[in-house]
Amino acid sequence: MTSGPAQITTNQTEVIDVEISPHGLPGCLRLPPRPRGVIIFAHGSGSSRKSPRNVYVAEALRGQGYASLLFDLLSDREAESRANVFDIQLLAKRLVGACKWARMAHETRGMPIGLFGASTGAAAALEAAVELGDQVSAVVSRGGRPDLAGAVLEAVTSPTLLIVGGRDPDVLGLNRAALAMLDGPKKLHTIPGATHLFSEPGALDAVISAAADWFDAYCRQRDNEQERR
């Protein structure tokens, strides 16, 4: 299921280069000791698995005991087309494929799955959550565009946290409207003073804190479950 050499750091975190079938999309799987769940990231338009913000969040969640999978939603050639970059259904299918890969991969088999979407990736995460149903334990959106999921929002039952910067009024309005359409546990969390990219000091750490609390509530594999594996 994996390719490329694994690298072990001094804190026992395993970082593995992987390819997500069937399209061979490159990814990076981070595994803490005794992971309690796996968080699969869906990056925004113009970004990739190397998004510095998503990498920062993934590493912080690793510290909270979660494995993470960051992967490219599109091949290099596909990403050259703006139509593909904003094709939410296509991105959602790729995310569904990554979730199926995680359910089968030796390193993550049986783990609860959470989705973390940014920008357009948030809409893809919500569409994927609808298709996968209870296979997705929770969804978190960072500065996302859930509105791009359209009428699919009404079918979302996965617990969903929408995180928006307090100084990102347009996106905040779109998230408020999307929140009203969601069906299931849901919350809109505003980071005071933060703009769309959460580049202000402490803003991204506030995102991580809110996301970790949400995943702890809905996506964390309990100790007794882990011991039975």
Image (tube, helix red, strand yellow):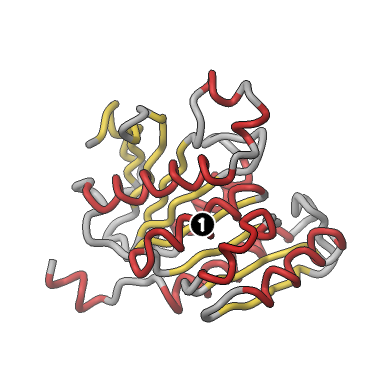
Tell me residue 32's x, y (percent).
34, 54
Tell me residue 218's x, y (percent).
43, 76
Tell me residue 107's x, y (percent).
23, 49
How dense is the environment of label 1, judged by Cα within 10 Å: few (below 14), some, or many (20 and up)? Answer: many
Q: In front: 36, or 72?
A: 72
Q: Residue at x 51, y 40 (%)?
A: 90
Q: Which quadrant of the structure image shows residue 98?
A: top left
Q: In front: 143, or 228?
A: 143
Horizontally, residue 221 falls left or right of residue 46, namely left
Horizontally, residue 66 falls left or right of residue 159, namely left
Q: Residue at x 52, y 36 (%)?
A: 49
**In this view, which residue lies farthest toward the left?**
228
Q: Residue at x 33, y 50 (%)?
A: 31
Q: Which residue is mark 1?
A: 127
Q: Amino acid at mark 1?
A: Glu
Horizontally, residue 12 falls left or right of residue 148, namely left
Tell me residue 147's x, y (percent).
69, 59
Image vertical order of residue 128 relative to residue 25, above or below: below
Horizontally, residue 50 falls left or right of residue 216, namely right
Q: In front: 72, or 225?
A: 72
Image vertical order of residue 124 relative to residue 36, above or below: above
- Secondary structure under tag 1 reads helix
Q: Which quadrant of the structure image shows residue 172?
A: bottom right
Q: In front: 86, or 165?
A: 86
**In this view, which residue lies farthest toward the front?**
151
Q: Residue at x 63, y 77 (%)?
A: 187
The C terminus is located in which quarter? Answer: bottom left
> How many badges with numbers are in the image?
1
Image vertical order of residue 218 relative to residue 208, above or below: below
